[in-house]
Amino acid sequence: MVRSLPLDVQDNIKFLLKSGYSYSSIIKRVPGVKKSTISDYKRIWFPNMGPLKSGCKSEITATTKSYIRRSVISGKLKTRKDVQRYLCDLGCAIGYSACLKLLKSMEFQVRI
């Protein structure tokens, strides 16, 4: 039979799950706990809670996207390279393919 975690660790996991932290951030904050343990406790404590958000957070905000969209339509940013330079000036280190995906997600026809 598997022994349970100490109560302070359980309380810590419960608080982090309520706060909406991802599994990876909980694993970093609580040493010695695996993803399966966290999901088991989540299933016991919060049976109606939906899945946690997954994936990377976007560095490019919705406001920046709308500004880029307006700038491309008005002609301030004419090429993919101009968009990439603008984002690098803002501090978003973005590569060639990521810039293409960004423009395609805004429904611009982009060619390689």
Image (tube, helix red, strand yellow):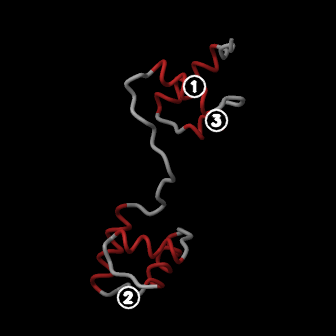
Occupied quadrant, residue 75? bottom left
Residue 27 bears which disc, if any? 3
* Contact between labelled residues 1 and 3, with CB atoms less than 8 Å apart: no
| Mark 1 secondary-structure assignment | helix
Q: Which residue is at a point 50% across and 25% down the rendered structure image? A: 42
Q: What amino acid does circle 1 point to?
A: Ile
Assess disc 2: are there few (<14), some (14-19) or many (≥20) residues with their C-alpha within 10 Å of its C-alpha: few
Mark 3 or mark 2: name the one nearer the start of the chain.
3
The residue lying toward the viewer, choosing from 33 and 29, is 33
Residue named by callout 2:
78
Residue named by callout 1:
13
Residue 4 higher or lower than 110, as above or below: above
Q: What amino acid does circle 3 point to?
A: Ile
Report the Cα–Cα distance between label 3 and label 2. Answer: 44 Å
The residue lying toward the viewer, choosing from 37 and 56, is 37
Residue 22 higher or lower than 49, as above or below: below
Can you give x and y, in whole percent of width and height, for residue 112 in the image? 46, 85
Can you give x and y, in whole percent of width and height, for residue 73 in the image? 28, 82
Report the Cα–Cα distance between label 3 and label 1. Answer: 9 Å
Report the Cα–Cα distance between label 2 and label 1. Answer: 49 Å
